[in-house]
Amino acid sequence: MASAPLSPGSTVGILGGGQLGRMLSVAAGRLGLKTHIFNDAPEAPAFDVAAEKTVGAFDDPDAIARFAASVDVVTCEFENVPARTLEIASDACPVHPPAKSFEVAQDRLVEKTFMDSLGIAVAPYAAVGSLADLNIALTRIPPSALLKTRRFGYDGKGQMAIHTLCEAQSAWEAIGEAPAILEGMVDFEREVSVIAVRAQSGDIRFYDVVENVHASGILDASRVPTPLSESLECEAKKIARDIAEALGHVGVLAVEMFQTRGNEPGLAVNEIAPRVHNSGHWTIDACLVSQFENHIRAICGWPLGDVARHSDAVMTNLIGEDVNAWQKFATEPGTAVHLYGKSAPRPGRKMGHVTRIRPKT
Amino acid sequence: MASAPLSPGSTVGILGGGQLGRMLSVAAGRLGLKTHIFNDAPEAPAFDVAAEKTVGAFDDPDAIARFAASVDVVTCEFENVPARTLEIASDACPVHPPAKSFEVAQDRLVEKTFMDSLGIAVAPYAAVGSLADLNIALTRIPPSALLKTRRFGYDGKGQMAIHTLCEAQSAWEAIGEAPAILEGMVDFEREVSVIAVRAQSGDIRFYDVVENVHASGILDASRVPTPLSESLECEAKKIARDIAEALGHVGVLAVEMFQTRGNEPGLAVNEIAPRVHNSGHWTIDACLVSQFENHIRAICGWPLGDVARHSDAVMTNLIGEDVNAWQKFATEPGTAVHLYGKSAPRPGRKMGHVTRIRPKT
């Protein structure tokens, strides 16, 4: 259901004050919108570029209600927002993306069954609620396989590889004996993702498919264009469209996929994120309208912006101490430096990224 | 004199909270820097995207001293900053651009004699301190000619055209009998400008020369590339270099020039601005590193960023009620919409701009 677009000057409420909130806030600013950032810690990258800030717990009903009452729309920079929080916010103002997108993205089992229901390929999986379940699952999905908690996993956290049957118990303990899934390893050529954006009107657009390279479970680099055939690129966008439409999604939706190897190469969905995504950061520098601006446009009921790419691009994350080389990156031709304003470059912490562009091939 | 670059996380103080301050603040945010905006009115576009804000008079020595003591560098979004204000700020922290750039840009007579001293062509001019001066000047520079106040003129304000000798007195009264210059009309093909940026190290870079079209004394559109010959484009950049170096300028410097007509086409400088400039807004969308980011880099002692242009561009200002068509612009392919967050679209007020890009010709 499309409502009237929010006027310039309106305030966008963002749950979460990390770098994604920061880049969303900057994009909103370009459109003449204000942002109000809600974060659970007093130091937040997004606070530096926002008109209003609130520090509070994401599950504090009163704080959330006050926050939602002070803004014109609420959105989120992370997927693990409690369902109750979204509900409370919805009582005061529109919330985008919809609750269903969070429900599906928050739970790996729900996500897999949702993909099944749409006929979208995923890695073989089994629900695991106990060590006994795990041992049974391992007969159907033999090692090497991945044991992943159903909830709260990201950047390689909450998951353990099981290479031999005798590792089952230690893996189960390592993930905290939490509800989980066992996932078969996918024999893949590459990981790609589609950054889609869907408007309140149902209009949906896709940035060019991007190839992702991980290191230690964290995204290292994203590269566009990919070597994907045109038909696979179309197929990837069709999958993203089917998911976004089935969710009734509004805003940016990121869909990570594997290009599988084997007799019949195809695509299998790894996971989705109902938000702007690290593998879409290149759109700031290689497209006229970035994923951040298009997310803001979508949730505000604005027409979507142009997703065409004017340049080829490689985005590289600056993780931990990587950021100390910022002066070197700042001198490189064709290189855009993005720093997130975080003070301590702890290992594994995303401190910034660089995007290198060159003319389209 | 280059000092060590300011670290990410440092705070940039900006005098002035209009749209230029807003776009500077967003650019600083991308580099992991904070901004503190000082403005003389409590409603300021730049406040929406800044970490800190101060409302105070630009000539309040105590407020300026406190502000400068709270930041790591001070810069300005407008040229008419009182010299004493820059001096007070300099006692507490580095100030860029230097006082000399403001001195020259604030006074049309000083500006013209400065260009003369560098051998740079300008329109014929004469100093006018009285009606008697004006009448004498008109014998040397016959009508049509322009009477312009030496100080505080912008967007066509503080100037009157004199078409016949009998208009001298009314023009003198219309500009408030303020110290002025009489300027001969230049027979020009087009107005162009050069956006230069000079680092603390002396490194200097130039964006591609842009052609400007005015309407009612206010910039209407800027277009790049221009039809200028390569040699004139080089000459334009050489002029900007000579000026920036003679000023010891640090930061962005905009130089407006006329491409003159006649037997020997050439360039005559119209005026300079020691700051980011409306005719450089296209750099946000058609270059990897915008004029705003390069200004921030320069004043912070960072290496300059890439000024290469990846696309052709036309920037059009949204003046007054123009902004009401924002929804139409937001649907146009190849169009970036920039709104400044100002509430009332008064006539003549710059409310936003749109940049239309297409592949380089």
Image (cartoon, coloured by chain):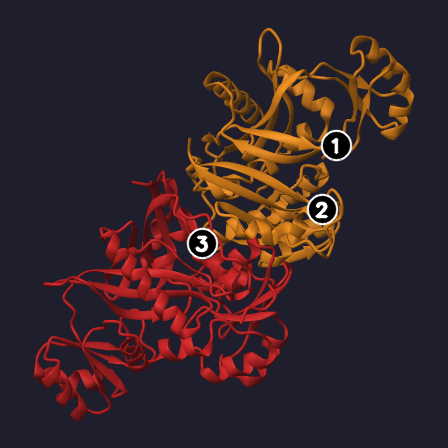
Chain colours: A red, B orange
**Residue B289, position as x, y percentages in the image:** 45, 42
Seen at 62% across and 9% down, the residue is B262
Q: Which residue is mark 3?
A: A290
Is residue A348 visible in the rendered structure shown here? no
Seen at 24% across and 90% down, the residue is A129
Task: Give the Cα separation between the discs numbered 3 and 1.
Answer: 36 Å
Q: Chain of mark 1?
A: B
Tell which tag, 3 or 1, sits nearer the viewer. 3
Give yes or no for contact between labels 3 and 1 (Cβ–Cβ under 8 Å): no
Q: Which residue is mark 1?
A: B156
Q: Amino acid at mark 3?
A: Ser
Which secondary structure, mark 1?
loop
Label drawn at residue B320: 2
Label drawn at residue A276: none
**Residue B79, position as x, y percentages in the image:** 67, 37
Image quadrant in which you'd find residue A178: bottom left
Are the residues flagged by discs 2 and 1 from a single subunit?
yes
Q: Chain of mark 3?
A: A
Task: Give the Cα separation between the discs numbered 2 and 1.
Answer: 16 Å
Q: Say which of B356 and B99 sits in front.
A: B356
Q: Say which of A80 and B337 sits in front.
A: B337
Residue A105 in the image: above or below residue A219: below
Q: Amino acid at mark 2?
A: Gly
Residue A72 in the image: above or below residue B361: below
Are the residues flagged by discs 3 and 1 from a single subunit?
no
Task: Give the Cα separation between the discs numbered 3 and 2.
Answer: 27 Å
